[in-house]
Image: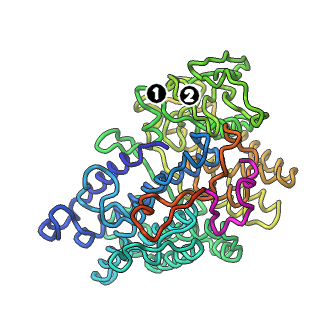
Amino acid sequence: MKIFIKYTLTLLLLAVLHTSCDDVVNLDLRDDPNSLSPEAASPNLLLNSVQIAYIGNQEFLNETGAELTRIEYFFGRDYFNNLPGNILNGVWERTYSSGATIIGDSDANNVAVGILTNLQALERANIAAEGSFDFHLGVAKALYAHSLFQIVDFVGVAAFSQAGNAGEFSAPMLDDGESVYNAAFGLLDEAEALLASGPNAQGAQDLFYNGNAAQWIKMINTVRLRSYVLTGNNAAFDAIIQGGDYIAAAADDFQVQFGTSELQPDNRHPDYVDDYKPDGADIYQSNWLMSLMSMNDDPRRRYYFYRQQTGTPGALDIAGVEVDANEEELSCSLVVPPTHYNGFIYCSADAGYWGRSHGNDEGTPPDNFRRTASGVYPAGGRFDDDSFGVVGLGVGGAGAGIEPIFLSSYVDFWQGIMASSAGDRAELMRSGLEKSIAKVQSFGSMDASADLSVAASAEEVTAYIDGMVSNFLSASGDAQENIFAEQYFTTLFGSGVEAYNYYRLTGFPTTVFPSWEPDPGPFPRTLLIPQNEVINNSNVTQKGDLMTQVFWDNNPSSPSFPPAN
């Protein structure tokens, strides 16, 4: 797991608080000189804290979902040992904050960074102000609702009915997943009602939609759509699509926008921070995704990945010449792949795509200026124009990337999932690819030094999409499902939560690389309950494995499912 989240969010929070300094209340109103209570903080600061906590959760959950589904590289041969009980501690705390500051080493003006605590304070402030803060409360409820859906998706259960009421429930019971889903749908209804009249943002810093309540309602409906996909509620899904009030165009995409500042605060995309350093790149990219996109000649690959080398040890370089194996730079290039990896790329991908395969637990060699780095999309890095240069501070898009959460292209794929015919599904896949590629290609101009003449032309993009649609329609059964799922997962690059959900919902694509370890243990159907909650809550008992299924996951139990594991 990358470790930048705590640092990045602390600086982002400090920046938000600094720009909101006029909203800080008189210090004499504090109950405790060392702790500013939520009631004493301005609603604008409370909403800032809700948004920062939510963004932290999205970064972490997107990465975790992407790693489990091979969109990103997962370290470790054994799932259980590499997904310990503390992995979701931060997500849980940022969601249910009891009032303590959750991230950062300083108290960040003593405003707690958490969702539920600050949501409750906003509710009290809005009552006192007779509805003046409907916008704040509507946004906070929408973000809390989505967070609850996600906790259920990752853990199977969540706190809701007894959460946030320490006086009466010092050790809150965890509710079953389906009841929490129903409660989250109710919160979305409340959020929509608060935002329906287009309330004024009252100077609040809306990090997503700049105070546009109508766009928040589209986001709310989009949260409903993703949840109806998982629960199979076709009627409710179709009703929203027919209403048209959801994220259907790039202008309404729900995403976090990063900047280019390196210091005070560092607001660059976290992957850029990790990969564009004086000592080279830190992240390993997924061999599965890079080889899939290279094989398909996907127009997005030059934007997703930046190659620092023309070839990888043990594979073919860009001219089709085999590169000698090199134990120091890539030790697995000298290893004979195990039998369960027959037909898959165990170590080295062709054409300079230098990454790692799922579960590789080797140490880190001196390859920071060799491994493939994050590209211009979504990290704001370099566009791959066959220059094969190196990464470094300030190059490419300088980190002004995005964290995708809900994009219009995703929604088209969701409609494809719910479609009743192969023809409809193919056309929705087409629409999703058109939107995805257009958005990705718009990032090319961020890298002012790039030679964009090597980018796919409009004709080449059309040929690619036509080819995928044709391949889909001419296939059947699992082959057809794999084409759709591969394109969906490729479109989700930079995200990952919905890939993890889809993989458990359907088992596709079955073409993903297996784990390095022949027996990595059952694929994680849910993760462990956060260990901090288990330790501090006498009513919670930790699971003994990762096999507990979410209520919407009606597939065979692990290890027989997913079949590619």
Residue 243 image-quadrant placement: bottom right
Circles 1, 2 touching at the beta carbon (< 8 Å): yes
SS type, badge 2? loop
Dominant SS of magenta comes to loop
User: In this image, 314 relative to 368: left or right?
Assistant: right
Q: Is residue 393 left or right of residue 105?
A: right
Residue 489 lies in the magenta stretch: no
Element assignment for label 1 = loop
In the rendered structure, which amino acid carries the disc numbered 1? Gly
Give residue 42's position: percent from left, percent from top: 26, 69
Say what amino acid the circle numbered 2 marks: Arg
The label shown at residue 371 is: 2
Highlighted magenta segment, given as a residue range: 546-565
The percent position of residue 236, horizontal first and vertical second, equals 66, 76
In the image shown, does 108 or 219 lie closer to the viewer? Answer: 108
Q: Nearer the viewer, residue 184 or 333?
A: 333
Please provide percent x and percent y for residue 426.
78, 56
In this rendering, would 253 be left or right of 71? Answer: left
Q: Which residue is mark 1?
A: 280
